[in-house]
Amino acid sequence: MHLKPITPEGIPAALQKAERYRLLNDSSAAESICLDVLEIEPLNQTALVFLLLSITDQFAEELADGVGRAREVLPRLSDEYERTYYAGIIAERRARAQLHWGTLGAAEVASNGFKEAMHWYEKAEHMRPPGNDEAILRWNTCARMLGRHERAPVEREYEPALED
């Protein structure tokens, strides 16, 4: 099926709709709009950021495919700070999705994800624009999530199986 292109004049309104759809938890519609915008303006930074966020919004539904698709957007971001910051967003949202799924070992896997996100946020903090504290805010959020979900390993003494 051949998709219909949007007009260059419609891009600002399309981006507003993409943001609105994200806020309404319809991230797949927002993702589609961003892809339409990027067909016309492949380097549109707002569309790329909205695309990345729309994909990460869907991690709870499709984690495996989504992480790869989100990571593919990173090199297309022109600003090094944004590439670093959004790498943290991907790691943090992946960790949250793993907690959401609640599978065996999810807390440990999520803890590693939060730590990875904190690494990216710490890097972003050092290159942030003046007055931009978003990397610090996200780092603090991850630290609090770790505090809630990271458990100390339980040490048990070895007990041999009883013999008949």
Image (cartoon, rainbow, N blue to C red):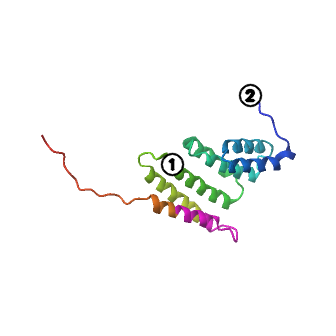
Q: How many labels does the image show?
A: 2
Q: Is residue 73 magenta?
A: no
Position of the N terminus by quadrant: top right
Q: Is residue 53 left or right of residue 155?
A: right
Assign a secondary structure to mark 2. Answer: loop
Q: Is residue 131 part of the magenta span, yes or no?
A: yes
From this viewpoint, is residue 11 visible? yes
Farthest residue, direction bottom: 130
Say what amino acid the circle numbered 2 marks: Met
**Could you say where residue 98 lies in the image, as x and y percent from the top left?**
50, 48
Per the image, the residue denoted by label 1 is 100
Report the front residue among 48 and 42.
48
Residue closer to the observer: 26 or 38: 26
In the image: residue 162, left or right of residue 8: left
The location of residue 8, given as percent across then percent down, is 85, 45
Q: Residue 66's spot in the image, x, y percent?
A: 59, 44
Q: Main secondary structure of the magenta part?
A: helix
**89 and 141: which is toward the camera:** 141
Q: What stretch is highlighted in magenta?
A: 123-142
Q: What residue type is labelled 1?
A: His
Q: In the displayed image of the protein, which residue is found farthest to the top?
A: 1
- Distance (Cα) linking label 1 and label 2: 35 Å
Nearer mark to the viewer, of 1 and 2: 1
Tell me the tag on residue 1: 2
**Residue 123 sits in which quadrant?**
bottom right
Residue 154, compared with residue 128, is above or below; it is above
Residue 111 coordinates in the image, percent (x, y): 47, 56
Residue lying at 27% horizontally and 56% vertically, measured from the top left: 156
Q: In this view, does 137 lie to the left or right of 160?
A: right
Q: Quick check: 141 above or below 7?
A: below
Q: Which of 67 and 43 is in front in this view?
A: 67
